[in-house]
Structures are given as C-alpha cells and as structure tokens.
Image (cartoon, rainbow, N blue to C red):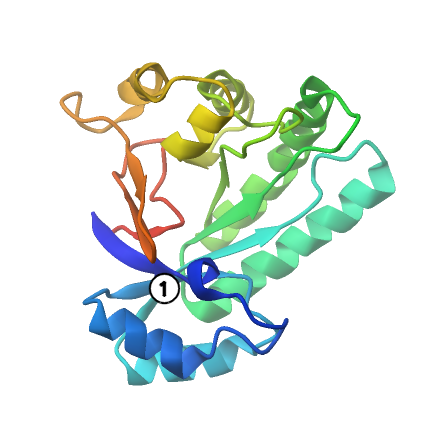
Amino acid sequence: MKISMMSYTIARGEWGQNPDIVSLCELTKELGLEAIDWVSTYGKDPDEIVRITGDYGIKNCCHTFGARLQVADEKERAAAIDVVKEGLETAAKLGTDKVMVVLSGIPGVPREETRTYAIDSLQKVVPMGQEMGIAVSVEHFPGATSPFAISADMNEAIAQVPGLKITYDNGNVFIGGEPMKPATNRLRGLLYSSKGAPTCSMLPAFSTTILSAMVMASTWSCVT
C-alpha cells in the first residue's frame, strides 16, 4: 500500500485553471508521495500531464471522473457509457491501470432504481476496462438518493458485475447511515488477508486504503 495525492483536494480554482500541474507535482514531492490520482484532467491534455509528472518522477495512479450511468433514459445512459470509454482512453494515456466512476444520486428518484440502472451500465463498461487492462471502480457516495451508499449496495453490485472494483470510503459509508465498523467487517471477507480490513482515512491532501481482492486499490492510493 502506498499513499498518493488526490488532485481534487486542491482543485479550487476556475475550470481548466486549477490545479496547476507543476505546483501540484512540487507539493506531491514535498509530501514525499509517489503518485497522483487525477480527478478529471481539468481541461489539460493527458500528454502534457504525463510529460510534467514524468519530469518529477511521479506516477499517475488513477483517473477519476463522473458519468451518468444511473439515469433511466437509455439515450442518456448510452451517452454516459461513451463518457466512460473516453475516460478509459484518458486513463490509458495517463498510464494508469484504474479509474473510478463517480455516481451520485438523482433528486426525487429512489436509490433502488438508480442502482438498478447503474449496475446495468457497469455490466457494459467493466468489460471495456478489462480489455484495456484497466480496473473500473465505484465508491460509496453519500446522500439519501445515492445508488451506492452502504456495504449492502456494493455487495449487490459485486454480485452482478464480474470484475467490478469498489473504492471503500468509511466516511461516506458513515454519512450514508451505516456505522463504519460493521461496514468494514461486512467487507472483511473480500481481503487478501483475513487479518486485515479495508480502510480509508481522509487527510487534508491525501487518503489511504488497503488493497483487497474486490475492494480495489483505492482511487486515492497508489497500490502496486
């Protein structure tokens, strides 16, 4: 397990203007971190990101982005699948072997419904990633309408989508209404080592997680 920078934590400027890649790399090196998870590319060309991070000896460990895989409209879902395709292509250019697709809730739509559509979409996009050697994950996302908020939601998805990985965020699980310790225990059996448990701790500039068989290398961590 290794710790990485998550670009989202310092991306607070105008779209395409922040974060500054050079400043982000310098901060990453200053913190003694080896990799960056790019939460979108902020309008930057992936080749430019690779060039600059390469100059600093920093690995691009993940590409995180949103796609509306959870909507009812078939045309919108098809468009979202195209967004994932583009995201996978960007990940390949960045040289990372993992992506996280952010799936939030839809106001007024029951989360059971959005989860059904999300799982259907994931059954299509996960194989796309596998063909490219890129793991596709989703995270626990807080909110009353979120399709994936607690461990039971994730277990449902894992059962129906072979190869799907999850990013375990115990803070988001707690916000979703499930105590962190029971949620962690419910995922314990997915670990490589029965002595461990998947954990994710949020710090101002980075997060960590433990790699497991299905609880994937967190998009916030550089796991080898």
| Residue at the (68%, 29%) spot, across then down | 120
| Residue at the (48%, 27%) spot, across then down | 175
Q: Is residue 7 above or below residue 26?
A: above
Classify residue 97 by image quadrant.
Answer: bottom left
Q: Is residue 170 visible to us here?
A: yes
Q: Is residue 168 visible to us here?
A: no
In screen coordinates, is 190 left or right of 91?
left
Classify residue 13 by image quadrant.
Answer: bottom right
Picture coordinates of residue 196, whole percent (x, y)? 17, 26
Picture coordinates of residue 169, whole percent (x, y)? 40, 35
In screen coordinates, is 171 left or right of 116?
left
Q: Nearer the viewer, residue 111 or 217?
A: 111
In screen coordinates, is 162 left or right of 86?
left
Q: Is residue 55 above or below residue 44?
A: below
Q: Secondary structure at mark 1?
A: strand
Q: Is residue 40 above or below residue 185?
A: below
| Residue at the (55%, 41%) spot, across then down | 126
Total residue callouts: 1
| Residue at the (58%, 78%) spot, across then down | 17
Picture coordinates of residue 96, whole percent (x, y)? 40, 61
Q: Amino acid at mark 1?
A: Ile
Q: Nearer the viewer, residue 63 or 181?
A: 181
Which residue lies under the disc numbered 1?
36
Picture coordinates of residue 134, whole percent (x, y)? 45, 51
